[in-house]
Image: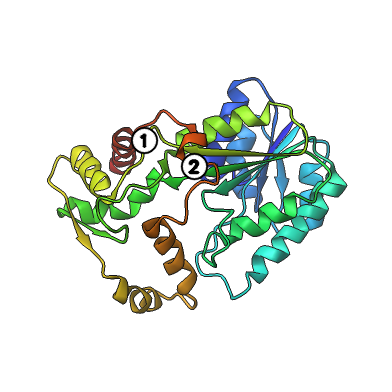
Amino acid sequence: MFTVTGITGKVGGQVARGLLAKGHKVRAVVRTPAKGEEWAALGCEIAIANIDDAAALTEAFRGAEGVFLMTPPNYDPEIGFPDTHRNAAAIREAIEKGQPKKVVFLSTVGAQATEQNLLNNSSITEAMLRTVSVPVAFLRAAWFMENAAWDIDSAKTGVVHSFLQPLDHRIPMVATEDIAQTATGLMTETWKGVRVVELEGPERYSAEDVAAALAGALGNPVRNEIVPRSSWEELFRSQGMKNPILRIRMIDGFNEGWIDFESGQEGTKKGTTTLASALRSLVSSKQR
């Protein structure tokens, strides 16, 4: 039995389906019974738990061959990441009491960076997982190619408003399909201690490449329009963010190059899905 958190999301759902396809039993962790109905119909055992509920998580993790761990995204955390620390404490208690045989945590590129930025959420969880008594793997994934979903409506009008700058600066990106396939493989492997797997796509991509891929998928010209760095804080605050500096510094990190893989490009595992392929699939799914 493998426990999968984040199962209602794109990556978690693909991990669960991948495990089921290989004949494994899956325990789906969901927040409400209604969210588990689809997975129960596929033969999954259902566990109801929130990520900060140590008691419920313990039962979800208990005796599992492996746990695929995702933590909820928090794009506007309070100073000091109190929610992340609280969640990490609950997860640690659940692991120690539930004693799964291993944990695969979906982390991020740049988790090792010491600069304060939004990705410190994953850094905090990694630090906690280094203290548990079971084998753990950090699957550090690059910038999701599917982040371009936010740009599709704008791209249909011929313009993408880019925070990635300079426009020709290439960063590591990866498709969720490759993340899920890698995670599914890790769940069925055996190792001791802490393992770090850093994952990106077959090559690196820039904002210009994203615009070109969207143009190909949509069938209309698409150009980039730079969002000036000086306007970001006011823009993010107008969208309701209370502490935008962490998000700003994350984007700075990609643009300036200090958010990258600890092992460098030569040390990463490479997925096979190209940006053009991922965005064609993304646009196709949006048009259904």
**Viewer-proximal residue among 237 and 28:** 237
Please tell me the numbered disc located at residue 115: none
Q: Which corner quadrant of the image does residue 145 belong to?
A: top left
Residue drawn 29% across and 47% down? 206
Q: Is residue 46 above or below residue 159?
A: above
In-image side of 222 versus 106 (left or right)? left
Q: Is residue 18 above or below residue 137?
A: above
The kind of secondary structure element at disc 1 is loop
The answer to which of marks 2 and 1 sits earlier in the sequence is 1
Residue drawn 49% across and 76% down? 243
In-image side of 202 versus 121 (left or right)? left
Measured from the top left, where is residue 216 in percent x and y?
A: 19, 38
In-image side of 271 versus 59 (left or right)? left
Q: Which corner quadrant of the image does residue 255 belong to?
A: bottom left
Q: Which residue is mark 2?
A: 264
**Viewer-proximal residue among 273 and 114:** 114
Q: Quadrant of the N terminus?
A: top right
The kind of secondary structure element at disc 2 is loop
Q: How far apart are labels 2 and 1 at the CA level?
A: 13 Å
Q: Quadrant of the C terminus?
A: top left
Residue type at mark 2: give it: Gly
**Viewer-proximal residue among 143 and 36:** 143
Measured from the top left, where is residue 285 in percent x and y?
A: 34, 39
Measured from the top left, where is residue 27 in percent x and y?
A: 70, 37
Bin the neighbour count of mark 1 within 10 Å (Cα to Cα): few under 14, some 14-19, many 20 and up: some
Measured from the top left, where is residue 274 in percent x and y?
A: 34, 33
Residue type at mark 1: give it: Glu
Q: Which residue is mark 1?
A: 203
